[in-house]
Structures are given as C-alpha cells and as structure tokens.
Amino acid sequence: MDARKLLLLIMALVMAGISAVVFRSMFGGQSEAEAAPVAAPAPQPSGPEVAVAVRPLPVGTIIGPDSFRYQRWPAELVGKTYFIKGESDLTALNGSVVRYAITAGSPVTQGSLVKPGDRGFLAAALGPGMRAVTISVSAQSGVAGFVFPGDRVDLMLTQDVPGGGDGAPLKAAETIIRNIRVLAADQRTDKTVDEEGKTVVAGTSNVTLEATPKIAEKIAVAQTIGQLSLALRSIADDKAELEERIANGEVKLPADSDPRAERQMLLEIASRPIDSNPTYTVGADVSRFQRSSVPAKPASSTPENAPATTSSTPAGPVVRVARGNAITVSTVGAK
C-alpha cells in the first residue's frame, strides 16, 4: 500500500476515535444526569398547627393581630401550653404583653404572655429601667381619642408665664418629651373593636405613658405648671429622627460592630423617649398682637403713707469688739 494512503487512513481512524470520545462525553453525561433519581421533598410535619411568632418579640411587646401565625408542628413536640388551631383564638391575645422574649418562628406558650387584667400586667409591659406615669387629658389634648396603646406621642406643655409689668402673662407652648410610648388609655391596654373588626374610637380622660425615671419626674412637675397635651407621631418619624440624631453626633455607633448587634442597638435607641433639645412657641409666633417675652416689673416705690424707718447703720468708720459671744460696735471719732 502506498505510504501516503496509509498515513491518511491512520489519521482518519484517529479523528474517528476522538469524535467518538467527545460525543460520549457530551451526551453520555446528560443521559446519566437525566437517569439520576429526583430528590424526594422533605417530609412535612404531620402534627397540629400551633401559633408561632412572626418576628422577634422582646419583653414588653404589646401583641397585635399580626404578631402570630399558625404553623404545622410535629405532634410529639407539641406541649400543653401551646396555642393550637381550632382549640384557641389568636384574636383573644390582642393586647397581651410578652413576659419572656420569643424568637421568630418559635411556638408561643401561655406562660410567655400576660393578659390585660392579670396581676403584673403593667409591670410586664414596661421595658427594662422604665417607669409608668399617668397624666390627665381632655378630648382636645388627647387627640380626640385617636391615641391607642402602643402608639408613640410627643408631650407638650402649655402655660401662662407671669411677670409682666402690665400684669399680662406670656402665652407659651413647649414640646418637653418626644417619642414616648402609650401603655394604656384609661384602663384599656388594647384597641377595642366592634363586631365588624373595626377599631372603636372612644374618649379618654387618662393616659399612661412609659418613661425613664428622670422623664417621669419632669412629667410630674409639668402637670403642676400648666396643661399637658399629646401629639400623635407618625411611624416614619422614628427612623427619620434617629438618622438626624446620628448625623448630629448625638448617637454614636461603634466603628467595628456586628451588623445584627448594631441593628438591635438602633432599635433600642429609637424606642426610648427623648427629652433633649426641646422646642417652644410663644404668643408672638402665632399672633402679632401677642408678646414674645415677659417685661420686667418696675421698681416698687415706697408708699406715701408708709412709716418712716430710722437706719441703725452708724455713719462713718466703725470698730467691732468681740468679747466671747458679745459683739460691740463703736463709731470711730464718736463723742
């Protein structure tokens, strides 16, 4: 056979072998993958549905309708204190307070909640280091009953400042506390709803607030000075005000901190009442016919019918001589 034809035959055999290997590697792996058995889905628990926390619920959290949801749980792990679907009503838990912290996704137990009217309810609603203080409000100063437990409000003090020379006081209003949480309205610690599930707006005469010990003292003094009023805050104000405090340097974040720990710290700071940098408004800011300050009283003159008094202070230099506890005053040069 010609050497040239033999070389071409060998090259053709080599190319055929290479093509066979490539074809097998491309389509053989795919067929093996298709032939591999599909992983079976994880078995679902066959137990009853129990109430679990939708999000982390720290101590003192007031329970709302969106705090829990039902989730299927293994039958062998269901405790007697769990809230089971069909045997309990989650709407009856609205207004309860978390006594022990509940992590997200954990079952809720009866011992972890305190219901309104139970002993220690208000103490459980308070955060660590906080105090409960009650103020009296009217329909006008209490936002016409639209303040409910769990809302956050600003506390304003309105007063007449006396001292004017003409006897007219200075009208002034001051925001003394911001971002303070409402614990109860009268003796209600939850929102009252009607048969259709709508919130009932009712007049309120007393509001219980959560405050630090120092702020509680300020509120007690403010009630003796003038009239206290509530200003309902928007939920979005908390984040905006916190960012402003961070920008001003009032709140300082550690340079190297865990993001989760930093987020928890920011949540705690945003939930605390603020009594710094109060703002105020006087009568002149509202009407041009009101004053902006209190003028000083004129110096009082001696009435004409006032009895004359004789000065007992000696004229000229004096010498004081002490003999024990007795002190004698003598005028120098006196005859």
Image (cartoon, rainbow, N blue to C red):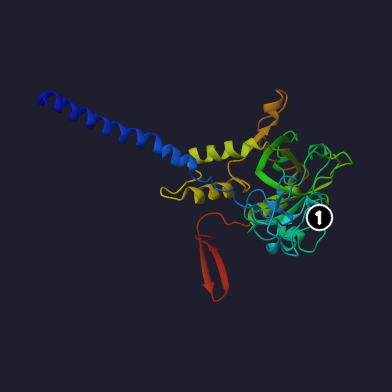
Query: Looking at the figure, which quarter contains the C terminus?
Result: bottom right
Give coordinates of residue 217: x percent, y percent. Answer: 68, 54
Give coordinates of residue 297: x percent, y percent. Answer: 68, 38
Question: What is the three-letter code of the residue carrying label 1?
Answer: Ser
Is 129 situated left or right of 37 in this image? right
Q: Quadrant of residue 301?
A: top right
Is 43 situated left or right of 120 in this image? left
Q: Residue at x 60, y 56 (%)?
A: 313
**Residue nearest the viewer, comparing 125 with 29:** 29
Q: Residue at x 81, y 44 (%)?
A: 137
Above/below status of 234 relative to 130? above
How many numbered marks have been drawn onto this rendered protein structure? 1
Above/below status of 198 relative to 330? above
**Residue nearest the viewer, comparing 90 with 334:** 90
Q: Residue at x 72, y 60 (%)?
A: 109
- Most extreme residue toward the front, as rendered? 1
Give coordinates of residue 321: x percent, y percent. Answer: 52, 69
The secondary structure type at the circle numbered 1 is: loop
Pointer 1: what residue?
A: 88
Q: Quadrant of residue 59?
A: bottom right
Q: Is residue 307 visible?
A: no
Above/below status of 290 relative to 52? above
Above/below status of 133 relative to 111? above
